[in-house]
């Protein structure tokens, strides 16, 4: 079962609280999944929902709050594998119900957004608006770089009203229009967490947050591994370059290499993968890593000066391509 389905199933069992909040949730479901249309001279209200339990809950609330007698029918389904949807339709007293739910104003005009009396309501009413919107047209994706909680809206006015309701709850949501479709989008993990909590999807919130933390831990571990690999590659390249330059320095200087510099160079060649600390410990007598590094640098500088005087390739010319480090 997808996260979206889990959220809708959990929200379907949430008690909105007051009758005003219950009415707000009904209005929101109709606004985000429904339609008000004229059939045979009378207004008919309908809402299309993803599952039978969602449809049955809406029908029950319509009967309890407004005394309506809705009918539930199942869609014939589309292409193979496409899930059925369920249509909740109110045929009798449709115009009255449209006014009561805010789909139509007192003058009989269709309302494009959400009623002000709801979007300016108390926290439980605002939460009910968001709960109904998600039940009707919401999606939640897995946590990660593209994580989002989206609500598809019928028009810009509805989207802006939902953004305003989120703002009154302290949640940062944004309105977007993509390919002509208006959406309200939350992408920040904190905003998604807040919204799931406000709507009442506590179980899914715990699952989503645990999954997010696991993925962040894995991503951090991967970054550390890549960092270590990069350091190892750089160390290996530096060792190859240093050994190649020391070998060239011995070729250039021959017997003219001072004994203390020769000792440092021979240590470098004898233990090619050792660190400077390890080279210093192997010296006789032992040296610090800075002493080893200093002697190797002086050996290379001496050889490079000699190469310059004689007009021949210096020590850097012997480094394999791609391993020369500044």
Image: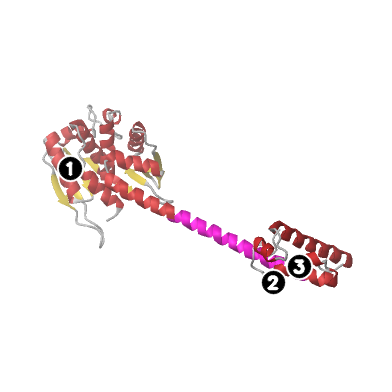
Which portion, as a residue range, is magenta?
218-247
116 vs 175: above or below? above
Where's the N terminus, which quadrant? Answer: bottom left
The residue singled out by tag 3 in the image is: 263
The residue singled out by tag 1 in the image is: 58
The residue singled out by tag 2 in the image is: 270
- Does residue 301 show up? yes
Q: Where is residue 80? Give x, y as percent.
A: 25, 63
Q: Residue furthest right?
A: 309
Figure quadrant of residue 127: top left
Q: CA distance from mark 3 to mark 1?
A: 87 Å
Q: Where is residue 253? Give x, y as percent.
A: 83, 69
Judged by depth in the image, the label closer to the viewer, 3 or 1, is 3
Residue positioned 68% across, 68% down in the render: 240
182 vs 302: above or below? above
Question: Does dot 2 land on a helix, a strand or a loop?
Answer: helix
Judged by depth in the image, the label closer to the viewer, 2 or 1, is 2
User: Left or right: 155 with respect to 105?
Assistant: right
Q: For mark 1, does the 10 Å Cα neighbourhood hold few (<14), some (14 to 19), or many (20 or more) residues?
A: many
């Amino acid at each position: 079962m997808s996260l979206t389905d889990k959220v809708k199933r959990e929200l379907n069992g949430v008690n909105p609280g007051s009758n005003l909040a219950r009415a707000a949730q009904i209005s929101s479901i109709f606004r985000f999944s429904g339609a008000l249309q004229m059939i045979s001279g009378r207004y008919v209200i309908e809402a299309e929902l993803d599952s039978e339990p969602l449809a049955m809950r809406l029908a029950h609330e319509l009967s309890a709050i407004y005394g309506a007698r809705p009918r539930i029918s199942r869609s014939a389904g589309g292409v193979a594998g496409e899930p059925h949807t369920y249509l909740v339709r109110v045929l009798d007293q449709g115009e009255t119900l449209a006014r009561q739910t805010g789909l139509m104003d007192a003058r009989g005009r269709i309302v494009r957004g959400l009623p002000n009396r709801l979007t300016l309501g108390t926290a439980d009413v605002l939460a009910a608006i968001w709960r109904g919107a998600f039940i009707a047209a919401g999606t939640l994706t897995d946590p990660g770089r593209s994580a989002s909680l989206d609500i598809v809206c019928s028009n810009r006015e509805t989207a802006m009203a939902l953004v305003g309701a989120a703002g009154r709850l302290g949640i940062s949501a944004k309105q977007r229009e993509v390919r002509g479709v208006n959406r309200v989008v939350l992408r920040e993990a904190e905003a998604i967490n807040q919204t799931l909590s406000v709507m009442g999807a506590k179980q899914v919130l715990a699952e989503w947050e645990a999954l997010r933390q696991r993925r962040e831990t894995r991503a951090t571990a991967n970054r550390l591994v890549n960092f270590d690999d990069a350091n190892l590659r750089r160390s290996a390249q530096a060792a190859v370059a240093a050994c190649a330059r020391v070998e060239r320095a011995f070729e250039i200087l021959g017997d003219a290499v001072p004994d203390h510099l020769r000792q440092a160079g021979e240590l470098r060649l004898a233990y090619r993968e050792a660190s400077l600390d390890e080279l210093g410990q192997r010296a006789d007598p032992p040296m610090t890593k800075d002493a080893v590094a200093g002697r190797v640098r002086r050996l290379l500088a001496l050889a490079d000066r000699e190469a310059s005087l004689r007009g021949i390739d210096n020590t850097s010319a012997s480094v394999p391509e791609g391993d020369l480090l500044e």
